[in-house]
Image (tube, grey):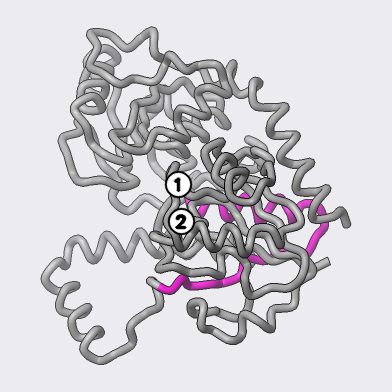
Amino acid sequence: MNVGIITFHRTINIGAVLQASALNSYIEEKGIKCEIIDFIPNNEIPDLSIIHKVLHYLRCILTLPTSIQRKKKKKKFLQYIDEYITLSNEVYYGDKDEKLKTTNYDVLVSGSDQILNTALTGNSKAYYLDFFNGKKISYASSFGRKNVSKEETELIRNELPKFAALSVREQSGADIIKREIGREPQLVMDPVFLLSKDEWCKRCNEELKLPEKYIFVYSMEVSPVLENVVSTIKKKTGLPIKIVRGGGKPGLIEGNEDSTCGPEEFLRYIRDAELVITNSFHGTAFSLIFEKKFLCIAHSTRNARLENILHLIEQDEKMIFNLLETYSDKVICGDKSISNLERLIDLSKDYLTQNIGKS
């Protein structure tokens, strides 16, 4: 059997790359030949014109320190992809690439992340597998929001009925699909939960030099609440703060920032931290996987996934929305909470093996 996956895997985003590698690895662990289709969405097709190259070169010179950091970070991502993701030999450039129609797979999986959100992909229809006539399934796909566009509604109605099996990672996505085509998708866990703690430990960068004890902050945005939580915890514990930003504008976070962090460094930071502070879904997910104590800060606009996973582990009241005098009663113990997800993780694995087929 030959399985292909289409998902976000090229972006320099820790969560995206880790979820892509997890789905790829889990299917391969079942003895099934599997690769990620090296698809570049419409809005990321490289501009190879001379003018673009000159402008890019000038920007790099004008922002040399940042460019050097960005290059180091990208190298770490490419090394991780090379080691842990099986890519198709062919690269496909957007929906108009005719080679997509000649792909030779028994099953195609429309993978996790916000791949159904056409605003992120330059209206790339390929994530809806419109080019493929064989068996199609989705795994933990997402729109990333509760309302969809007119174009997305048309894709849902035209393409998703052709899928042999549908699954999403959020109830809001299931509600959209049920409303538009009358099918009830299965809710499944993010792909990172498909791999064991031991497997993720093997992917940690053991050469990274870290303090014996430290607090790790993984921030998708800086907010007054996050700043206050970090400052309060630092004063209480006296421990050094290690920071990685997954997005958002720069802000005032007390600590030492790693601006070139790659996937393997991220995993190590969480695995060995005394406490994790995060407003990220994958920061929360890996705190659970590595059974760490952590604080979950609300994001200003994107809380659906955070609220969903805290609900699943029965810790809804622990999300931090406002400034508090103390945060000790908001600490979530990952070692106790991960057990609440075992049944859902097993159901997610069963969904994949039953709909793809065992070796």
Q: Is residue 301 magenta?
A: no
Q: Nearer the viewer, residue 42 or 50?
A: 42
Q: Farthest residue to the left: give it.
A: 62
Q: In the picture, which quadrant includes the N terminus?
A: bottom right
Amino acid on which the number 2 mark rests in the picture = Asn
Query: Badge 1 local density, few (<14 within 10 Å), some, or many (20+)?
Result: many
Residue 144, labelled with which disc?
Answer: 1
Query: Badge 2 local density, few (<14 within 10 Å), some, or many (20+)?
Result: many
Where residue 65 sits: x, y (%)? 17, 62
Q: Quadrant of residue 158?
A: bottom right
Residue 117, labelled with which disc?
Answer: 2
Could you tell me which residue is drawn at 58 percent across and 44 percent down? 179
Do residues under tags 2 and 1 come within 8 Å of each other at their CB atoms? yes
Could you tell me which residue is drawn at 58 percent across and 61 percent down? 83
State whether residue 345 is above or below residue 315: below
Q: Is residue 260 shown to the viewer in this render? A: yes
Q: Quadrant of residue 105?
A: bottom right
Q: Nearer the viewer, residue 22 or 77?
A: 22
Q: Earlier in the sequence, mark 2 or mark 1?
A: 2
Could you tell me which residue is drawn at 43 percent across and 23 percent down? 294
Give the magenta range.
16-42
Total numbered circles: 2
Q: Is residue 38 magenta?
A: yes
Q: Is residue 62 left or right of residue 157?
A: left
Where residue 214 sits: x, y (%)? 35, 27
Q: Is residue 214 shown to the viewer in this render? A: no
Residue 204, labelled with which disc?
Answer: none
